[in-house]
Amino acid sequence: MLVTRLFSRSVLMLFVIGILMSTGCSSSKQSSKVVTATSRVNEGYERAQKLYEKEDYTEAIITLETLLFTSRATALEDDVLFLLARSYFHSEQYLLAVDMFTKLQQQMASTPYARTSQFLLAKSYEKLSPNFELDQQYTSKAIENYSIYLDLYPMSDSSKVASDVETYRELLKINPGNESYKQNYATAKAQYARIDSLRYAEKAIPVLREKLAKNTFFIARQYIQLGKYTAAGVFYDEVLKRYSDTIYVKQAWEGKIDVLVKRKKWYDAGQALDQYLQLFPDRQKEMQGIREKIKHHFKN
């Protein structure tokens, strides 16, 4: 009996030791796999960075696309997404850039790339904006995203930032090794670069709005050619309502008056003419003939 008990205990101990050794080996293997996967992501990202810096965007994209899954929930997840989005942008694959910038913002709202990605998202839509005769969905998206950019990141005092850049540049000439000067100079330059992007957004929005106004005005003119004057009037009104800050507002008023005259809406035509001349009093002489025509028919 004693021998049997001793044998049973020995077998049990060997079994436990075997489990512990197996568990230790398994944990070691799993840890090794994690380290290997992280190393591969780091190596792949470094390789993609070098390709991007060489402007070999096609190869950078191929490398980064293989990292999309393996970089998830790692420290490099937003780096991979951002570099891939920029690679798409510089290779003129703007729809893919839009998708990737949007994904970065949705998945990682606190990323340090949020500001730049918002600007480049708007710029990607601007690049996708087609000729004024075509559908202007991307034009509207560009305006929307530039507006978001301006709202989220308002402009700093540009004169002060420019002064800081110049000050620390001169200080570094005197003391090139001063770390504080280097850091402040780098910060000031980064702020100045942001101001440039804000100025770009401010200038881009009116240009894009002109395109939308031109598109709407163009549709109104097409309806005129088809003899569909009511529909034309709707689009002239759209220009007046939504794009009164563009160069097409004057032509839209003239088009609206012409449409009302063609439809024999004499009272409405007279009202529209009065509003037009209030806005453009220098056109009194040119519109005198239309004024007389409206008066003549309205009395009768």
Image (tube, rainbow, N blue to C red):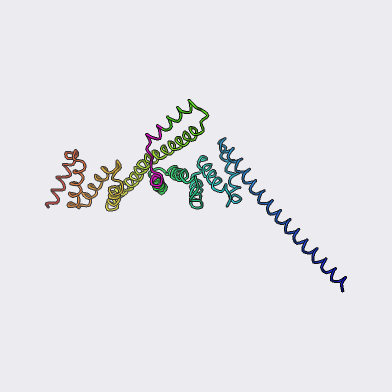
Could you say which is closer to the camera, residue 225 or residue 270?
A: 270
Q: Residue at x 80, y 66 (%)?
A: 12
Looking at the picture, tell me which residue is in the foreground, 59 or 22.
22
Residue 135 appears in view: no
Residue that lies at the very extreme toward the top in this rendered image: 174
Q: Quadrant of the N terminus?
A: bottom right
Which of 268/103 is in front? 103
Residue 246 visible? yes
- Give the dominant element type of the magenta stretch: helix, strand or loop: helix
Query: Magenta part of the protein: which range?
Result: 146-163
Where is residue 120? Give x, y as percent: 46, 43
Residue at the spot 30% in from the left edge and 42% down from the top edge: 246
Q: Is residue 9 left or right of residue 296?
A: right
How many numbered circles does the render carry?
A: 0
Residue 39 picture location, percent across and down: 65, 46
- Is 166 included in the stretch rendered in magenta? no
Q: Position of residue 165 (x, y in %)?
A: 43, 32
Please name whichever residue, 196 or 51, is drawn nearer the observer in this view of the structure: 196
| Image-based side of 64 in relation to 170, left or right | right
Residue farthest to the left, as pictured: 299
Residue 67 location (% of width, % of height): 60, 47
Question: Is residue 234 shown left or right of residue 8?
Answer: left
Does the magenta segment cover residue 162? yes
Instruction: Describe residue 232's horizontal placement relative to residue 25 as left or right.
Output: left
Tell me if residue 20 comes above or below residue 130 in the rendering. below
Q: Residue furthest bottom?
A: 1
- Residue 11, by quadrant, is bottom right
